Image (spheres, rainbow, N blue to C red):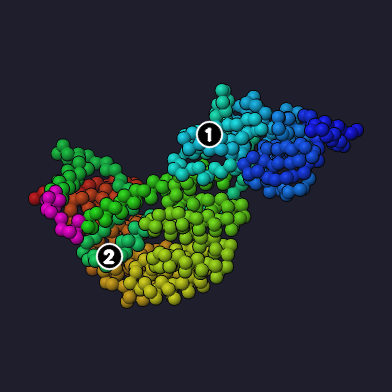
Amino acid sequence: GINAEYGDNRLDLSLVGPCVEEAKFWCTVKSTLPGIGVKVQVTPRDYGIIPLTEISDTYHKDPLAPFEPESLVHCSVVMKEERQLILSSRKSRLSQRWKKAGGGGTRKVTNPVISDSKDVAVGKVVYGYVRSTNPSLGVYISLGHNVTGRVLLKNMSDQFLKHWQPMFPAGKLVRAVVMVTDPKIELSMKASDLRKARKEQDGSEGEEDDEVGDVQKCLDDILMERLANSESEQSEQSGDDEEEDEEEDGPKITFTQPEPKLTTAAPKGLSLSDALEEKEEMEEEEEEEKAKEEEAKPLSKSAAKREAKRRKIEEEEKLRSAERKTDTTAAETEEDFERLVAASPDSSASWVSFMAYWLGRGNVERARAVAKRALDTINYRLESEKLNVWSALFNLENSFGTSDSLMASCQAAAAVNDPKAVFTRLAAVLDKSHKFEELDEIYSSVLLKKHRRSRNVWCGYGTSLAGQEGRMSEARELLTKALKSLPKHKHVRTISHFAQLEYKHGEPAKGATMFENVLTSYPGRLDLWSVYLDKTIAQGDHEQTRLLMDRVVGLKLPAKKMKFFFKRYIDFEVQQGEEERAEKVRKLARDFIESSDQ
C-alpha cells in the first residue's frame, strides 16, 4: 500500500512502509562517521544511523570500509528516537536463518547483540569499539547501541602506559573482559585477565588462539636465541676491545663447573672444608683492606671519568635487563603488542615479538614496518637493543626477501652502528641458514679485511668453518693466519678457542697438544686448566684426568684459587667410586693448608 505523511502543508506519498521497530528497508548511504557508524537515508524525510556495533554480526577492524556514498544497504529498524532512526544491517536481524542472541536459528553470531548489562556476565570476554577516552579515567567502549563499558587506567595493561591515548582512537576494535556489571559495566584489557577469562570459558574464545606458523617458529629459533645471548655477546666484544691494554700475566678465571661438596673427617677438630674456607677468608680480608686503602686515595680526573662511565654503563645494563624480562608471551593480539611496546619502548624483545606476530600471519610488510618503528623508537644510546632489532630484520630479509634487500638492510645498519658488530650479526644469520658461500664472502671481504686485530672475528669464522662438514682443515689454517694478525696478548685465548673446536669437531689429541703447548708457557692460567679439565673429563679418559688434576693441585697458588680444584678433584674420585683415591686428595689438601700456614 501507499504510506501517507502530512506536514508543512505537504502530503508525502511513499511505497515504503511505516518506520517501526523490525521494519526492513533498503537505505541509501549518505556518509560514514568515524567512531560512530553509517548515516543513511530511509525516505526523503527520514534519516538514520547504523552504529558500529550494528553493522555486522562479526566485528571488523575497519567496519566502515565497505560503505560507499549513494550505495544501497539493507537495514532493519532497531528503535526510533526523536530525530533519527537507529538501524541495523546485521544479518541476524534481517534473516531468521541466522542465530540470534538467545534465539534458535541455524547460523552462529560471532558477536551477538548486547542490549543491556544483563547480556554480559562477570568474567566474559567481550568485543567493542572505542567510543571516547578520558585522560584521568580511561577508555569508554561501546558494547551495544545503548551499552557502554569503561576501562580504568589501572585495568588498561599489565605494564605502565605513559602515552596511551593515541593507542585508542575512536572506532578502534578492542577486546576486554567484564569485571563488574552493577551499577556500571567495568572492563579490563589486561592480558593476564584475558588469559584467565579464556581458561574459565574453556576455549570459547579459541578463535584468538591462532596456531603459530612455521614462519614464526623460524623467527623464534633464529632471532630469540640471538636476543637471549645478546648480553653475553656484547660483554665478549667489549672484553675483546679492552684486551688491547691488558697484559698476559693477569689470568681471568671463568669456572664452568659447580663446586662439589666436601665429605671428609675433621682433623684436629677442624674439617678440611672449614680450613680451606678459613684460609680463603684471611686472603679476602687482606684484599678488602687493600681495596679500602685504594678507595681512600683521591681519584685523578681520568680515573673519576672512568668510574663515572662505569656506573653509567651499569645503570643502562640494569635497565636493559629489566626490559628483557618483559613478559612477551602474554601478548596475543595486535592490541596486546601495541600496549607491550608502548610500555617498554626500548625493549628489543617486545619489538621482535611484535615482528614475529605479523610474520606468523604471513604479513611480511607489516613486520618490516614494525622493525622500522622499533629503530626509530629505541633510545639511540641502547645500541645493543637496536642491534637486536637489526638482527631480526636481517633474519626477515634472509628468509623472505632477496640478497639485495638483505645487503641493503646491512648497509643501512652499518651506517648508524658499529660496522663490525653489524656484519658479525649478519654472519651469524648466514651461518644459521647454512648460506656458507655468502658467509665466506662477508668474512673475506669485510670482517677479516677491516678487523684483522679482533679475536672475536677470527674465532667466529673458525667456529663456522669447524662446524661445516669437511672444513676442519680450513679452520686449522685460519688459526695460523690469525696468530700472524692478532696482537700477542690475544694469542692464548685464541689458541684455547681453536683447541676446544678440535675436541668438538676435529681430533681431541690435537686439542690436547694445543693446550699443553700453551700451559707450558703460561702454567698459572687457571682458566685454561679448567677448560682443559672439562674437555678431558668429557672424553672419559680418567687416567689423563688424574694426571692433570695432580699437576694443577701441585701449583703454588693462593688458597682461594686452589679450593676449587681440590674440591673438584675429590668429587671426581667420589663419582668414580674411588674413595681411597679421594682420601689421598684430602691429605694433599691438608698438606697444602699446613705448608701455606708456615
- Residue named by callout 2: 243
Labels 1 and 2: the sequence-earlier one:
1
Nearest to viewer (mark 1 / mark 2): 1
The residue depicted at 27 percent of the width and 67 percent of the height is: 244
Check disc 2: other Cα within 10 Å, few if <14, some if 14-19, many if 20+: some
| Residue at disc 2, secondary structure | helix
Check disc 1: other Cα within 10 Å, few if <14, some if 14-19, many if 20+: many
> Looking at this rendering, what residue extends furthest in the top direction?
183
Q: Residue 381, image x and y in percent?
A: 37, 57
**Most foreground residue, 132 or 575:** 132
The majority secondary structure of the magenta stretch comes to helix
Q: Residue 56, image x and y in percent?
A: 71, 40
Can residue 226 be seen here? The reply is no
Magenta stretch containing residue 296, yes or no? Answer: yes
Disc 2 marks a residue whose amino acid type is Glu
The residue depicted at 67 percent of the width and 28 percent of the height is: 115
Looking at the rendered structure, which numbered label has been put on residue 108? none
| Residue at disc 1, secondary structure | strand
Quarter of the image containing the N terminus? top right
**Most foreground residue, 235 or 526:** 235
> Looking at this rendering, what residue extends furthest in the front direction?
9
Give the image quarter of residue 6. top right
Disc 1 marks a residue whose amino acid type is Val
Task: Specify start and end residues of the magenta stretch as a single range.
Answer: 292-304
Q: Is residue 310 left or right of residue 414?
A: left
The residue depicted at 30 percent of the width and 47 percent of the height is: 259
Looking at the rendered structure, which numbered label has been put on residue 151? 1
Q: Residue 269, image x and y in percent?
A: 16, 37
Q: Is residue 499 left or right of residue 219?
A: left
